[in-house]
Amino acid sequence: MELFVKRAPLQVVDAMRQTVTNMIGTLPPQFFTVTVSTVA
């Protein structure tokens, strides 16, 4: 993942980040506990 982020265009990295975030947000809550943390 680190290599992907270093080599891919910023727009592609942002699109991938948004896609993964959307996928995590749609996991059924009865089967998963989702915790999101960020560092600024």
Image (tube, rainbow, N blue to C red):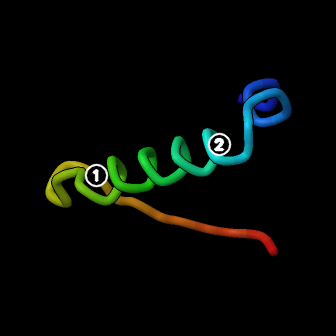
Quadrant in which the C terminus is drawn? bottom right
Secondary structure at numbered mark 1? loop
Quadrant in which the N terminus is drawn? top right
Residue 26: give x, y in percent of width and height: 23, 55
Identity, as a three-letter code, of the amino acid under mark 1: Phe
Residue 34: give x, y in percent of width and height: 39, 60
Horizontal side, residue 20 vs residue 30: left or right: right
Residue found at x 48% / y 64%: 35
Residue assigned mark 1: 32
Q: Residue furthest bottom?
A: 40
Q: What label does residue 13 carry, if any?
A: 2
For the residue pair 4 and 34, the one nearer the viewer reads as: 4
Residue found at x 61% / y 39%: 12
Identity, as a three-letter code, of the amino acid under mark 2: Val
Secondary structure at numbered mark 2? helix
Contact between labelled residues 2 and 1, with CB atoms less than 8 Å apart: no
Disc 1 crowd rating (10 Å Cα; few below 14, some 14-19, many 20+) is few
- Above or below, 5 against 23 in this view is above
